[in-house]
Amino acid sequence: MSENIEKKDILILGIETSCDETAAAVIKNGREILSNVIYSQIDLHTLYGGVVPEIASRKHIDKINQVIEEALKQANTELKDLDAIAVTYGPGLVGALLVGVAEAKAIAFGANLPLVGVHHIEGHICANFLASAELEPPFMCLVVSGGHTHLVNVKDYGEYEILGRTFDDAAGEAFDKVARAIGLGYPGGPKIDKVSCEGNPEAIHFPRAKVGDSGYDFSFSGLKSAVLNYLNSAEMKGEEVNRADVAASFQQAVVDVLVGNSMDAVEKYQAKKFAIAGGVASNKHLRAAFEEACKNRGVEFFLPLPILCTDNAAMIGCAGYYEFMKGVRSGYDLNAVPNLRLGER
Ligand code: KG4
Ligand code: ZN
C-alpha cells in the first residue's frame, strides 16, 4: 500500500550568518538548490582590513529579512511549503550567529515549523553533496576556511572523526595576514590566488611545518612569521620585494602542507574518495594540486564550485536536511555557540 503513496519532497530553508555573509537558501530533498541568496558584507569590512564583529551583526539585522524573502521568492516557495528551518548556530562570531538563530527561531515559531541547528563546518562539508549528486559517505574531507583547518573522516551522514587540525592559524587566516603584509588588502585569499599566477612558487623557500604526533595536524603561524621576516629583512637591506614571488612561494608552502598531510591520511586510511571544502578550497592552485594528487593515487576527487566553498546557506540547508531526516530537532532555547565543536550538539 505504501508504494502508492507519492513521496513528498522535503523543502528546507537554510540560514547562515556566522561571519560576514548574510545568506538564505531553499534546498529540495537535501541535494537540489532551489535558491541560494548571498549578501556579502565584504566591502564594508575592507575599509578596516578584516571583519569587524559589531558591523557584521548590525548588517545581518539590516539584511536578513530581505535575503530570506528573496530566497523564498526565487525558489517559488512560501513558508507553508517548507518542512523545516535549518540555521548555523556555531562556530562563528557570537553577535552574527545570534541574528540568524533569533530569526530562525521566530520563523519556526510563527510558521509552526521544526527547527534544526547546524554546525557551520558540517555545512561546508555538505557543500560537496550539492556539488556532486553521486557522492555518499564514507569519504575524507579537508575543510579549509578563514577560521578552520580540519582534516575529517566523514564516516556517515552527520558522523565525523577529526584526524587533524591546525594548532594555531587557520589556512585562510594565514592567507589574509600574509596578503595584508604584502599590501594586497582584504580579503587576502582571492588576491594571493590571483597575484600568484604571475609569480614563481619556487623563488623563496618558506618552511613547511610538521607538528603533532598524528602527522595530520597543521601549523601556519611559523610560515606567516617567515614571510614577515623575509619582508622585514628585505626592507632593512633596501631591497625591492617581488610581491608576486612572495605570494606564490607562500601559497605553494600552504598547498604542499595541506596536500601532503591529506594524502598521508588518504594512504593510511585507504580512503577511496577525497573532498575539499571551505573558502580556501576555492583557491585555483589548491584545487589543481589536489586533483593531481588524488589522480596519482586512484582516489576519486570531489570539490564544490567556488560559490559553494565560501560561506552560503545552501550548504546549511543540505546539512540541515540530513540532520532533520535523522530526527534531530532544536528547541526554542537554541543559542549561538561561538566555539561549537564538530560532532557536538
Ligand atoms: O569559508 P569562508 O567563506 O568563511 C569561513 O568560514 O571562515 O572562508 C573565508 C576564507 C578567508 O580567509 C579567505 O581569504 C579565504 O577563505 N579564501 C581564499 C580564497 N577565497 C577565499 N583563500 C585562498 N584562495 C582563494 N581563492
Ligand atoms: Zn565558513
Image (cartoon, rainbow, N blue to C red):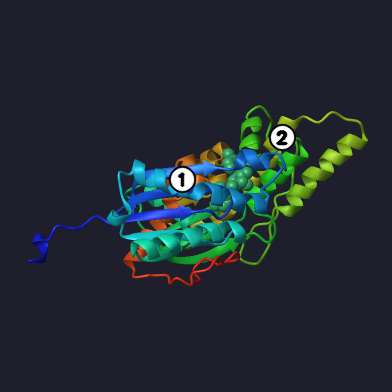
Which residue occupies 42% across, 54% down?
A: 14
Q: Judge left or right: residue 165 versus residue 300.
A: right
Quadrant observed for ligand 1 in the rendered image: top right
Picture layout, residue 248 above or below residue 327: above
Residue where numbered disc 1 is placed:
66
Q: Amino acid at mark 2?
A: Leu
- From the top left corner, tell me how far across and down residue 342 is, in percent: 52, 66
Residue in the image at 41% along x and 65% along y? 116
The kind of secondary structure element at disc 1 is helix
**How many numbered marks are there?**
2
Image quadrant in which the N terminus is located? bottom left
Q: Residue at x 74, y 40 (%)?
A: 180
User: Is residue 251 visible in this depiction of the protein?
Assistant: no
Q: In percent of the image, x 38 and y 51: which residue is there?
A: 129
Residue 192: x %, y % from top left: 66, 36
Please provide percent x and percent y for residue 309.
50, 46
Residue 223 located left or right of residue 255? right
Q: CA distance from mark 2 to mark 1?
A: 32 Å
- The image position of residue 225, as x and y in percent, is 79, 49
Q: Which image quarter: residue 149?
A: bottom right
Mark positioned earlier in the residue sequence (2 or 1): 1
Q: Nearer the viewer, residue 151 or 168?
A: 168
| Disc 2 versus disc 1: nearer the observer | 1
- Tell which residue pokes out farthest to the right in this image: 237
Q: Look at label 1 and name its amino acid.
A: Gln
Q: Which residue is mark 2?
A: 184
Local secondary structure at mark 2: loop
Dot 1 alpha-carbon crowd within 10 angstroms: few under 14, some 14 to 19, many 20 or more? some
Q: Is mark 2 within 8 Å of ligand 1?
A: no
